[in-house]
Image (tube, rainbow, N blue to C red):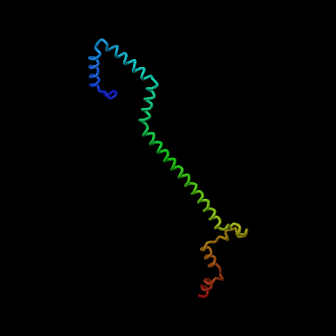
């Protein structure tokens, strides 16, 4: 387990050197002084600014990537908006041209022709001819 890049064996080595340099009598006083210093350091505004800057630098690549993706998504969104406007305009023009090209048959049909008689299929017309006694098919059958 590493703490601030210092392993357990390195920490024991530093404590042994501190014990030899400072001496056994002053080691407690020195540890209290170092503790107070670290406490003031961690509570200071400078330490907060330093940790905030460090956090910002660590998250900078991810934030830049997200912002780049957002810009790209906004570009795609704008292109879809432009394409949808063009499609609507094309659809409206096509509808106008189609409506202009197709005559309005409702105004040309008289009220008497509005029934189903005006709309006969070819099979209905063929049946009507065979039932007509004046047609050539029926007369040729009667002669034989």
Residue farthest to the right, as pictured: 111
Where's residue 100, x and y in %?
A: 65, 66
In this rendering, the answer to whether 143 lies above or below 62 is: below
Q: Which one is nearer the viewer's eye here, 99 or 131?
A: 99
Q: Does residue 23 appear to the left or right of 99 in the view shown?
A: left
Tell me what residue is drawn at x 43 percent, y 29 percent. 50
Q: Which one is nearer the viewer's eye here, 136 or 107?
A: 107
Number of labels in the image equals: 0
Please identify the quarter of the rendering in which residue 53 is found.
top left
Tell me what residue is drawn at x 45 percent, y 27 percent. 48
Where's residue 75, x and y in %?
A: 51, 49
In this rendering, the answer to whether 54 lies above or below 22 is: below
In this rendering, the answer to whether 78 lies above or below 52 is: below
Tell me what residue is drawn at x 31 percent, y 15 percent. 27
Where's residue 45, x and y in %?
A: 46, 25
Q: Does residue 74 appear to the left or right of 96 in the view shown?
A: left
């Amino acid at each position: 387990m590493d703490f601030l890049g210092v392993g357990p064996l390195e920490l024991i080595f530093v404590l042994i050197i501190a014990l030899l340099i400072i001496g056994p009598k002053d080691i407690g006083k020195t540890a209290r002084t170092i503790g107070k210093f670290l406490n003031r350091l961690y509570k200071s505004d400078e330490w907060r600014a330093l940790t905030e800057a460090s956090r910002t630098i660590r998250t900078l690549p991810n934030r830049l990537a997200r912002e780049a993706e957002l810009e790209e998504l906004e570009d795609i969104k704008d292109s879809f908006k432009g394409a949808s406007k063009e499609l609507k305009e094309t659809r409206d023009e096509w509808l106008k041209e189609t409506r202009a090209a197709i005559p309005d048959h409702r105004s040309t049909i008289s009220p008497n022709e509005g029934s189903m008689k005006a709309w006969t299929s070819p099979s209905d017309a063929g049946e009507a001819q065979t039932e007509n006694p004046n047609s050539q098919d029926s007369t040729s059958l009667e002669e034989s």
